[in-house]
Image (spheres, grey):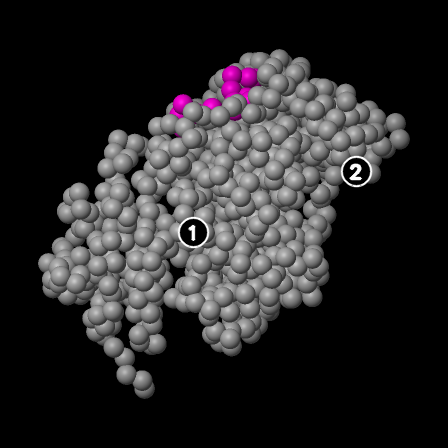
């Protein structure tokens, strides 16, 4: 039987290769506070229309997420990178998704205790009933926490 | 006194009051409506639809029966079997009851789909009227001329006989649509939204899914529409039954097994899925390919030679297989639907707003060009769905992209684009959404007519299977994201049931197809101008009303446009404020031209 890795171990390995500086700069400067551009609009599409990325940074992060999902060939997790909203750190969102979107989706939302714990620097495991999620801090070159890596297994991703 | 009324198909009637629900309708009372509906005309090879509105007496709907006689002409007959009856199902919309879902009625007095059983399930508060939708198919083979027949409605009060005096025209609607009415949806929403599929984990293996999906395709086909089912999610994931089995990676990647793919799609591509329909076994004209940012090539390799190897190699295999199977009447679309709002990819393949994302067009054309540029065999084309950047792109990419699906409002700002794309051999569809149930039926008839007037090849409703869990009461988005309803839970039907809006769309498509057929027979340029004139006259429009002019912000890059600007931007309004009977006026003048 091949050796399998725990989800947390996979997240630790993945986070080693994630360039946190790229996550900080995954959007061009003029788009980082994109929700402010459409404050007051009630169109369901307006917010998403404002999203833009620095492609090289996004692609580098995406590649690590896709490869992290494959570290253990006996597991099939999906990976995503969460950030806190600069204009309101109580809120967060997925900024780069790997093979699938987490079940929470791609919208900006209020962060919950498990993921906030990881944003404070402590890797966190979350029991999801049929499945499991781990949250692992992602740091930039200044060793600041700039995001959280999510790995989830046996929880259906968002269908979109 | 009559307790039932035979009326035309362009208005709907309130089940509580018997009043016409279309606010701008010319005729308000059922008796008047019956008067103006008694002498229809129809082309051959076409459906003629009308409605029977029955005032309920003390016995309720249980005593109501419908029976059709054949229609007899001097030399020919249209059999009673060409009539099909549907109970109208009422939904709660904006505080009123509107009919939309149509439930096929069982022929006899018993069964789960009698008018009585359906009305009981519908539970309309204070119902005083029931309504039945009637489709009459006028076969291609009957002779033109006058036909007479009748429908008898038996109620607790007696029998009403509604005479039908039908004028069958020489004109025949072509089997193949000359305008594409594209009903889009996303795989595999059917399995998510239909209870009997959702509960069956073996649906792809035991044949259940394929049968159910085919019923949707057949219903679309019979209503002169194309169900267009994008096989991949935004992530690039694809259900296994929608792709061939692949083995290997890089240079070793190849198709291992086509069998499930062929079982799934073969019947659409050789037309056999449509045997027994009135239009016949015609292959679907367009189909999405599953190719996307993350299939078959691994996006972890994006930008490398290995990504190209995987993408181009499998596309070549697709082309070879499709050609060998003889699937030569369908255009297969390479379409990149990914949107960066979902944070799965950094580019908008769909509706590019940030101009630098246009590189996706160049990258993927280059990856696929060996197949896209083939001059024989199966036809693969590059498709784009354009909105923000359409004005910047139609000239720049006309040589690479051959199917342009353009936001209907933004397309109307660029009449000059039509010749540019035509000259490059491109096809053009506009896109928008299905109409809300509370909107007049005339609104549903507009898209085919606007396509003819503008001279584009088709139009798209972007989502057509999102009826919502509570559709029986109020469909999601008031029906504007579905043209079908599921038949399984309430009525024991494996496939869909149609909507009144789907019937109205078919009626307009028949007109549009007759117009396009006639245009094709006229000297270049003259036919379309004459048809546009007929539309202008019937609708009381200014000539060229479908080109409303340009907004004042086109000099700014699209990523600087703001949503608020669109409410002020020019928009073609062809039907607002006009009575639904306007469509009947157009048909009358059209039949006078076409004969």
Asked if the stretch drawn in magenta spans residue B576, the answer is: yes
Q: Position of residue B106 (x, y in %)?
A: 61, 41
Q: Position of residue B110 (x, y in %)?
A: 59, 42
Residue in the image at 59% along x and 17% along y:
B541
Residue in the image at 70% along x and 24% along y:
B529
Q: Secondary structure at mark 1?
A: loop
Residue A113 vs B62, above or below: the answer is below
Residue in the image at 59% along x and 47% along y:
B399
Q: Position of residue B275 (x, y in %)?
A: 70, 52
Q: Residues within 10 Å of mark 2 (few under 14, many from 20)?
A: some
Residue contact between numbered discs 2 and 1, judged by CB atoms under 8 Å: no
Checking the image for residue B560, the label placed there is: none
Residue at image mark 2? B140
Range of magenta residues: B566-579
Q: Main secondary structure of the magenta part?
A: loop
Question: Quick one: A2 or B572, which is closer to the camera?
Answer: B572
Question: Quick one: A81 or B96, which is closer to the camera?
Answer: A81
Question: The N terminus of chain B lies in which quarter of the figure?
Answer: top right
Asked if the stretch drawn in magenta spans residue B117, the answer is: no
In the rendered image, residues at marks 2 and 1 fall on the same chain = yes
Q: Residue under mark 2: which chain is it in?
A: B
Cα–Cα gap, marks 2 and 1: 43 Å
Residue in the image at 37% along x and 55% along y:
B345
Checking the image for residue B338, the label placed there is: 1
């Amino acid at each position: 039987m091949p050796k399998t890795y725990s989800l947390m171990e996979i997240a630790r390995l993945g986070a080693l290769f994630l360039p946190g500086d790229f996550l900080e700069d995954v959007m061009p400067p003029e788009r980082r506070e994109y929700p402010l551009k459409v404050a007051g609009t009630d169109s369901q599409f307006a917010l998403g229309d404002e999203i833009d990325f620095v492609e090289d940074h996004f692609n580098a992060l995406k590649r690590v997420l896709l490869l992290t999902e494959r570290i253990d060939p006996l597991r099939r997790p999906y990976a995503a990178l969460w950030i806190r909203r600069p204009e309101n750190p109580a809120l967060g969102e997925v900024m780069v998704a790997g093979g699938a979107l987490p079940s929470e989706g791609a919208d900006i939302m209020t962060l919950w205790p498990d993921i906030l714990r990881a944003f404070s620097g402590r890797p966190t495991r979350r029991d999801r009933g049929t499945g499991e999620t781990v949250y692992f801090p992602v740091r930039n070159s200044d060793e600041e926490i700039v995001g959280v890596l999510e790995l989830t297994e046996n929880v259906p991703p968002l269908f979109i | 006194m009559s307790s039932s009324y035979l009326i035309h198909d362009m208005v709907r009637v309130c089940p509580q009051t018997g009043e016409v629900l279309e606010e701008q309708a010319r005729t308000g009372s059922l008796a008047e409506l019956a008067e103006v509906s008694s002498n229809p005309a129809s082309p051959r090879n076409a459906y003629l639809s009308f409605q029977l509105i029955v005032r309920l007496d003390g016995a309720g709907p249980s005593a109501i029966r419908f029976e059709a006689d054949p229609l007899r002409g001097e030399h020919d007959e249209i059999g009673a079997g060409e009539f099909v009856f549907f109970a109208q199902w009422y939904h709660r919309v904006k505080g009123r009851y509107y009919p939309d879902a149509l439930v096929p009625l069982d022929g006899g007095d018993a069964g789960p789909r009698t008018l009585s059983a359906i009305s009981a399930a519908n539970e309309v508060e204070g119902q005083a009227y029931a309504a039945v939708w009637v489709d009459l198919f006028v076969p291609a083979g009957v002779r033109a001329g006058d036909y007479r027949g009748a429908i008898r409605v038996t109620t607790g009060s007696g029998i009403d006989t509604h005479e039908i005096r039908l004028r069958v025209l020489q004109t025949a609607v072509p089997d193949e649509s000359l305008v594409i009415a594209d009903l889009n949806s996303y795989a595999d929403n059917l399995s998510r939204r239909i209870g009997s599929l959702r509960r069956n984990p073996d649906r792809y293996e035991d044949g259940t899914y394929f049968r159910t999906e085919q019923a949707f395709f057949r219903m679309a086909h019979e209503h002169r529409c194309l169900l267009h089912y994008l096989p991949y999610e935004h992530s690039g994931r694809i259900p296994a039954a929608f792709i061939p089995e692949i083995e290997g990676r890089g240079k070793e990647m190849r198709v291992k097994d086509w069998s499930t793919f062929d079982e799934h799609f073969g019947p659409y591509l050789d037309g056999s899925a449509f045997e027994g329909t009135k239009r016949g076994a015609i292959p679907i004209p367009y189909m999405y390919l599953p190719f996307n940012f993350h299939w078959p090539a691994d996006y972890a390799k994006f930008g490398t030679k290995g990504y190209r190897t995987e993408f181009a190699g499998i596309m070549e295999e697709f082309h070879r297989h499709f050609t060998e199977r003889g699937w030569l009447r369908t255009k297969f679309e390479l379409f990149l639907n990914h949107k960066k709002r979902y944070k799965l990819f950094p580019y908008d393949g769909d509706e590019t707003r940030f101009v630098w994302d246009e590189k996706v067009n160049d990258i993927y054309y280059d990856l696929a060009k060996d197949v896209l540029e083939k001059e024989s065999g199966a036809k693969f084309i590059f498709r784009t769905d354009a909105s923000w950047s359409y004005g910047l792109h139609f000239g720049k990419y006309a040589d690479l992209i051959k199917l342009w699906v353009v936001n209907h409002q933004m397309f109307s700002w660029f009449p000059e684009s039509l010749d540019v794309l035509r000259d490059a051999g491109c096809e053009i569809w506009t896109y928008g959404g299905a109409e809300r149930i509370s909107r007049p039926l005339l609104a549903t008839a507009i898209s085919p007519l606007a396509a003819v007037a503008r001279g584009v090849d088709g139009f798209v409703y972007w989502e057509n299977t999102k009826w919502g869990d509570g559709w029986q009461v109020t469909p999601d988005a008031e029906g504007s994201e579905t043209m079908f309803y599921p038949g399984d839970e309430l009525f024991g039907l494996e496939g869909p049931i149609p909507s009144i809006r789907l019937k109205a769309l078919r009626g307009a498509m028949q007109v549009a197809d007759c117009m396009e057929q006639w245009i094709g027979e006229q000297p270049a340029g003259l036919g379309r101008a004459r048809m546009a004139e007929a539309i202008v006259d019937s609708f009381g429009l200014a000539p060229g009303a479908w080109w409303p002019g340009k907004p004042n912000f086109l000099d700014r890059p699209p990523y600087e446009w703001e949503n608020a600007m669109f409410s002020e931007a020019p928009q073609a309004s062809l039907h607002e404020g006009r009575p639904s009977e306007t469509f009947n006026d157009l048909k009358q003048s059209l039949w006078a031209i076409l004969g």
